[in-house]
Image (cartoon, rainbow, N blue to C red):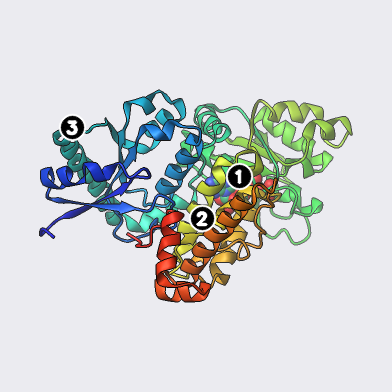
Amino acid sequence: MIANQRSVVVWDKNDAFSQWGPAFQETMPEWRFKPIPPRPVFNFGHDPHPPMVGLIVLVDDLCSKSHQQDISEIETVIARTSHLTRWIGLIDPGCLKDERLMSLIGHNFFDYHRLPPDLLRLSHAIGHAYGMALIEKKSLEAKSGAISQGDEQEMVGSSAPMRQLFQDIRKIAQTEAPVLVTGETGTGKELTAKAIHDRSPRKSGPFIAVNCGSIPHTLIQDELFGHEKGAFTGAHQKKAGKIEMAAGGTLFLDEIGDLPLDLQVNLLRFLQERVIERVGGVKSLPVDVRVIAATNVDLEKAVKAGRFREDLFYRLNVLRLFVPPLRERSEDIELLAHFFFRKFSGEKQKCLKGFSSRAVEAMQGYGWPGNVREMISRIRRAMVLCDNRMIQPSDLGLESRPTKTLGKLKEIRANAEREGLEAALSQTSFNITKASHLLGISRVTFYKLCKKHKLKLATP
Ligand SMILES: Nc1ncnc2c1ncn2[C@@H]1O[C@H](COP(=O)(O)OP(=O)(O)OP(=O)(O)O)[C@@H](O)[C@H]1O
Ligand SMILES: [Mg+2]
């Protein structure tokens, strides 16, 4: 190996790279090209020294019927690698007509080159990509204390409805009108409200959240509007309410459907006149606050049933955002899972590598009634309970997705074989001797089977 040689990982499902490998090495001796497994049984998303540059080789074969599966494999590879890694595509011109592929390249790649590659141009691109990744790595290291703070609020999603939501959030953030955020429990309504605030001109002001469903009815008035000294027995001092505390910023009213009818009148008055009166007070105080409300119940129905004032509903419903349930954006499931895995990796289980493919399948097949919040708690639990290097469906408390149609016996056998190999590798931390022993087969057979299922064994 040449001193100061830097690694470039290569994803090359169709083994096309081997024909150019020697020429690459000759033209670019400063780089070491390392293949990575086509089926991503690895996870180096939180590797302290992740690869800075990766090549993804796509030959025409990829544009065959199984194209979608290959795209999702590439997405998984990218998701399981550090976000620092810059990807460069080496692409057969025949593949460039595929819209999904172009969108994948546009969103995730640093650059792409047509096959056969122009080695000089490619060596420049690799150098450039490496330089860019290094700049980001250094800047992250310099402010490492602030990263977790930022990540805390990060909203993840690549599905079409989430991309639309991000766009709407950016637009809505620039306005002052009230917003009503709807969606099932745990979908990210509060996160959406916070994202609006953080992108709005009010971002340096406070973001105050009030959960109307969890405060006893008798206390909500005081909680929202505050009180004057002596307003009632025990009111020894004047107290500012949450509306006043949000002055200059945003007030987030969660579970607005639970606000008692009498307080709905007070809130309506505040929204119309922009003034409040503390309990026991006589003067009106002007307060500059933007209101964002959220509900997981159908407010239109509540209006019809007389539980929610129609006039307040129209006041709040000026701008409306819907956060879709997780089961309707299956593309986000794996992305979110890896995001939370990385987020909680610092807490425990440093040797944990990621999710087994069966765990990913089980997550994809599950209905997620508790949405993202449920995913967080299942992943946290799995990360504590998991005894292997890879999280299994049982660690997540999820059965594998039931096979819809049984398929041919040959396929069932092949799947079971692959799953057995993956589980054995995972349980033995990729120790081939132990893994083959566990399955009661020789090392030679083990290697043969891994080759058959394209499971590469060396973790990069
Ligand atoms: N797209 C996302 N990316 C990252 N984290 C998310 C995302 N959506 C939700 N979360 C996380 O999931 C959890 C639940 O989100 P949030 O509290 O915003 O949901 P909610 O819709 O307000 O739930 P509820 O109706 O139960 O109040 C939070 O920890 C939030 O940070
Ligand atoms: Mg909430």
Image quarter (top left, top right, bottom left or bottom right) of the N terminus:
bottom left
Image quarter (top left, top right, bottom left or bottom right) of the C terminus:
bottom left
The residue depicted at 35 percent of the width and 61 percent of the height is 459
Callout 1, which amino acid? Gly
Q: CA distance from mark 2 to mark 1?
A: 14 Å
Q: Quadrant of residue 42?
A: bottom left
The response on whether ligand 1 sits within 8 Å of label 3 is no
Q: Read off the residue under disc 1.
A: 188
- Identify the disc placed on residue 118: 3
Place of residue 178 in the rendered image (x, y in percent of width and height, measured from the top left): 63, 30
**In the picture provided, is 41 more to the left or to the right than 232?**
left
- Seen in the picture, residue 257 relative to 458 is either above or below; the reply is above
The response on whether ligand 1 sits within 8 Å of label 2 is yes
- Seen in the picture, residue 203 relative to 310 is either above or below; the reply is below
Q: Nearer the viewer, mark 2 or mark 1?
A: 2
Furthest-top residue in view?
97
Are the residues flagged by discs 2 and 1 in contact, CB closer than 8 Å?
A: no
Callout 3, which amino acid? Asp
Are the residues flagged by discs 1 and 3 in contact, CB closer than 8 Å?
A: no
- Seen in the picture, residue 67 relative to 7 is either above or below; the reply is above
Callout 2, which amino acid? Phe
Q: Nearer the viewer, mark 1 or mark 3?
A: 3
**Residue 227 seen in this snapshot:** no
The residue depicted at 69 percent of the width and 28 percent of the height is 317
Pointer 3: residues within 10 angstroms few (<14), some, or many (20+)?
few
